[in-house]
Image: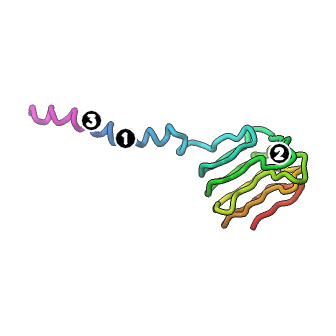
Amino acid sequence: MRRLAAFFPIVIAFGAISLAPLAAARADGREEGPFEIEKCQTIDKPGSYKLVNNLTFSSLTGTCLTITASFVTIDLAGFTISGQSATATAIEAGNDTTGIAVRNGTISSFGSGVDLRGNSSIGKRCFCATGVMAQ
């Protein structure tokens, strides 16, 4: 009986150690809901992203949302990305990206609304007042 009593704490400790990596995966955000976008930025990690407010890009050149990672979904969530220049781009994904999706919002006053250069990428339900480029 003493052997069984000594074995029980070891089993419990082993169980806690083996479950610890699962808790860590949830703590770093990979298992949680979409990452929130509050401002123009570079997206360099795969995952799901969602606008939480309208974005305004005030520069005359450049890009509001630059995507450098593959397998990124951006949900504009009914919000608008607006610019003020025919030489700026609202959302651009590089040539080396794949699996990019942009949907559910409005883009206005840019020279290029959504420029998805990578393979297998879609701009879906993105009402772009200035045009969509998808190759």
Query: Toward which corner of the image does residue 113 lie, by quadrant?
Result: bottom right
**Amino acid residing under circle 1:** Leu
Residue 68: where, in percent of width, then height? 65, 53
**Amino acid residing under circle 2:** Thr
Question: Which is more toward the observer, 58 or 14?
Answer: 58
- Return the residue at label 1: 19
Which is closer to the viewer, label 3 or label 2? 2
Residue 63: where, in percent of width, then height? 78, 49
Rounded to the nearest angstrom, the CA distance separating label 3 from label 2 is 52 Å
- Residue extending furthest toward the front: 61
Residue 14: where, in percent of width, then height? 27, 39
Give neighbour class at mark 1: few <14, some 14-19, many 20+ (Cα, 10 Å): few
- Could you say whether the residue bearing mark 3 is in a helix, strand or loop? helix
Give neighbour class at mark 3: few <14, some 14-19, many 20+ (Cα, 10 Å): few
**Which residue is depicted at the point 74% across and 55% down?**
92
Q: Which mark is residue 12?
A: 3
- Return the residue at label 2: 80
- Could you say whether the residue bearing mark 2 is in a helix, strand or loop? strand
Give neighbour class at mark 2: few <14, some 14-19, many 20+ (Cα, 10 Å): many
**Amino acid residing under circle 3:** Ile
Confirm or deny contact between disc 1 and disc 3 (CB under 8 A): no
Residue 77: where, in percent of width, then height? 75, 46
> Is tag 1's residue or tag 2's residue first in the polypeptide sequence?
1
Q: Which mark is residue 35?
A: none
The magenta stretch is 2-13
